[in-house]
Image (spheres, rainbow, N blue to C red):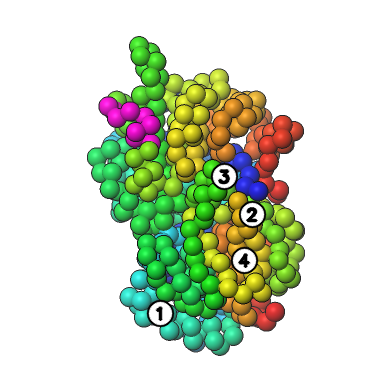
């Protein structure tokens, strides 16, 4: 039986890990290489490293740490943030990434998804979709460029077209819930998960193990990404999975 | 000498890291000049596309050399797509002949009962028979899979371990000194690292 996944997220800014709130106001939360080693010893199911540097799209900050980070990381590593094209993706995979997150680049060059999937397999291509709830219309609205650029394409059309082009996984991120620790946006997660046939990772909002239980029970999602939960509390992936196992949710045996 | 073939498509570093972790010093083999005679063990990693992997081997005229290496009885380990190309035939993006070291065909995972494809995540490793590769690996432990296609061996004896995803899928296959893992042992923490160590210590006999 396929197990649920808990994926710690590490946000990289200026060589350090940070915690954000609603894609803004960051606080330092530690060293990326050391944190990856800790998550490795805590039997995290995967790790996600996202570069949120705002000096224009670039994978240079990722490349500076990917070597040492992946040497202490014997679980899958998903990397993204600032990936502009095929060559960036190839370099990241060569340097230790197992999967690469594409986000803003797919709006200008949607063919990138197909090209990447043809070369690296669709399982290596994760498309990240950042979403804000429009306060006026109540609609889930797609944003790119670190949440700065509103996109006209309807959410489900965008997600579906990415999957049709070859995305192997969708990372659905609620900007409103980011770092606020008030729970996942369940309608958003349910909507996206019900639309696509590929695995979905939900992100944004996890502040407690009960939020994980709610999203796993309330939607068909099988993978949840958590940043703040593990940054600022005594929580860790081992305890999270122990709690969730008591609620009938399967996790891997360590 | 343990060699890891550079397929120019996968996460090569992580395979080397994991083999170093268990106390060996593997060498990365440039596809242009592989010292096959010096190898005691050969690992073919791979992330990606069956057709792209075979094209890579063809470009460098590696297929006959790999077959000759396998015929010498020295251990060969394919990982993920590196495992799939051991089969006789792949069907990803049209029919493509594989290395033919394990009779069988690689087919897309059926999207049964709303199952999502690719099959991504941790799933149980269920041994089908005893094999040196599984020494010291606890039964039913989870390993990390990420794939859309699966190898169906023609001969049930070539199945060493399976996993369940709507239907049984081959997780480890093997014939003589040639073995392959569909999952990523280098990304499967303790259980996976144990399998890699077993391979590095294996003389190729069952």
Q: Quadrant of the C terminus of chain B?
A: bottom right
Indicate the secondary structure of the residue bearing disc 1. loop
Q: Is residue A155 magenta?
A: yes
In space, the residues marked 3 and 1 are separated at their CA atoms by 40 Å
Give the percent coordinates (x, y) of residue B147.
50, 55
Residue sitting at x 56%, y 59%: B184
Question: To which chain does the residue with label 2 belong?
Answer: B
The numbered disc on residue B62 is: 1
Q: Crowdedness of circle 2 by 10 Å Cα count: few (<14), some, many (20+)?
A: some
Q: Crowdedness of circle 3 by 10 Å Cα count: few (<14), some, many (20+)?
A: few
Query: Do tag 1 and tag 4 residues touch (Cβ < 8 Å)?
Result: no
Q: Of the residues under marks 2 and 4, which one precedes in the sequence?
A: 2
On the same chain: label 1 and label 4? yes
One can see residue A50 in this view: no
Camera-nearest residue between A222 and B164:
B164
Q: Of the residues under marks 1 and 2, which one precedes in the sequence?
A: 1
Q: Residue B58 appears in which quarter of the rendering?
A: bottom left
Residue occupied by mark 4: B172
On the same chain: label 2 and label 4? yes
Question: To which chain does the residue with label 1 belong?
Answer: B
Camera-nearest residue between A131 and A234:
A131
Please identify the residue farthest to the top as the structure is shown: A136
Residue sitting at x 58%, y 70%: B153
Give the percent coordinates (x, y) of residue A229.
59, 29
Residue occupied by mark 2: B164
On the same chain: label 2 and label 3? yes
Q: Quadrant of the N terminus of chain B?
A: bottom right
Residue occupied by mark 3: B113
Query: Do tag 2 and tag 4 residues touch (Cβ < 8 Å)?
Result: no
Indicate the secondary structure of the residue bearing disc 2. strand
Magenta part of the chain: A151-159
Q: Of the residues under marks 3 and 1, which one precedes in the sequence?
A: 1
């Amino acid at each position: 039986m396929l197990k649920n996944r808990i994926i710690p997220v590490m946000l990289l800014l200026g060589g350090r890990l940070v915690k954000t709130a609603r894609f803004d106001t960051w606080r330092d939360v530690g060293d990326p290489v050391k944190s990856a080693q800790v998550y490795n010893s805590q039997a995290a199911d995967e790790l996600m490293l996202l570069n949120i540097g705002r000096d224009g799209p670039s994978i240079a900050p990722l490349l500076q740490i990917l070597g040492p980070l992946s040497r202490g990381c014997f679980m899958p590593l998903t990397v993204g943030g600032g990936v502009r094209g095929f060559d960036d993706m190839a370099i990241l995979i060569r340097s230790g990434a197992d999967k690469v997150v594409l986000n803003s680049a797919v709006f200008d060059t949607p063919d990138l998804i197909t090209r990447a999937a043809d070369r690296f397999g669709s399982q290596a291509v994760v498309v990240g979709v950042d979403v804000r709830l429009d306060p006026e219309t109540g609609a889930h609205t797609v944003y790119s460029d670190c949440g700065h650029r509103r996109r006209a394409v309807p959410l489900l059309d965008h997600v579906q077209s990415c999957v049709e082009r070859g995305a192997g996984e969708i990372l659905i991120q609620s900007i409103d819930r980011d770092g606020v620790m008030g729970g996942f946006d369940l309608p958003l997660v349910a909507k996206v998960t019900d639309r696509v046939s590929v695995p979905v990772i939900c992100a944004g909002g996890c502040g407690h193990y009960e939020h994980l239980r709610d999203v796993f029970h309330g939607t068909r999602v099988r993978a949840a990404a958590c940043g703040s939960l593990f940054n600022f509390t005594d929580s860790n992936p081992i305890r999270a999975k122990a709690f969730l196992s008591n609620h009938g949710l399967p996790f891997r045996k360590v | 000498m343990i060699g890891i073939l550079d397929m120019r498509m996968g996460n090569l570093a992580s395979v080397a890291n994991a083999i170093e972790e268990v106390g060996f010093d593997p060498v990365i083999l440039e596809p242009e000049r592989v010292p096959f005679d010096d190898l005691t063990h050969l690992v073919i990693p791979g992330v990606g596309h069956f057709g792209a992997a075979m094209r890579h081997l063809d470009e460098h005229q590696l297929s006959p050399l790999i077959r000759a290496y396998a015929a010498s009885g020295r251990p060969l380990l394919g990982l993920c797509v590196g495992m799939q190309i051991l089969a006789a035939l792949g069907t990803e993006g049209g029919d493509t002949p594989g290395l033919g070291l394990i009779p069988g065909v690689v087919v897309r995972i059926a999207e049964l009962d709303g199952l999502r494809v690719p099959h991504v995540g941790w799933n149980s490793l269920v041994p089908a028979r005893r094999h040196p590769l599984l020494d010291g690996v606890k039964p039913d432990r989870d390993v990390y899979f990420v794939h859309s296609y699966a190898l169906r061996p023609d001969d049930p004896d070539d199945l060493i371990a399976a996993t369940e995803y709507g239907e049984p899928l081959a997780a480890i296959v093997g014939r003589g000194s040639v073995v392959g893992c569909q999952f990523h042992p280098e990304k499967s923490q303790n259980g996976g690292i144990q399998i890699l160590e077993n391979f590095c210590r294996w003389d190729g006999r069952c």
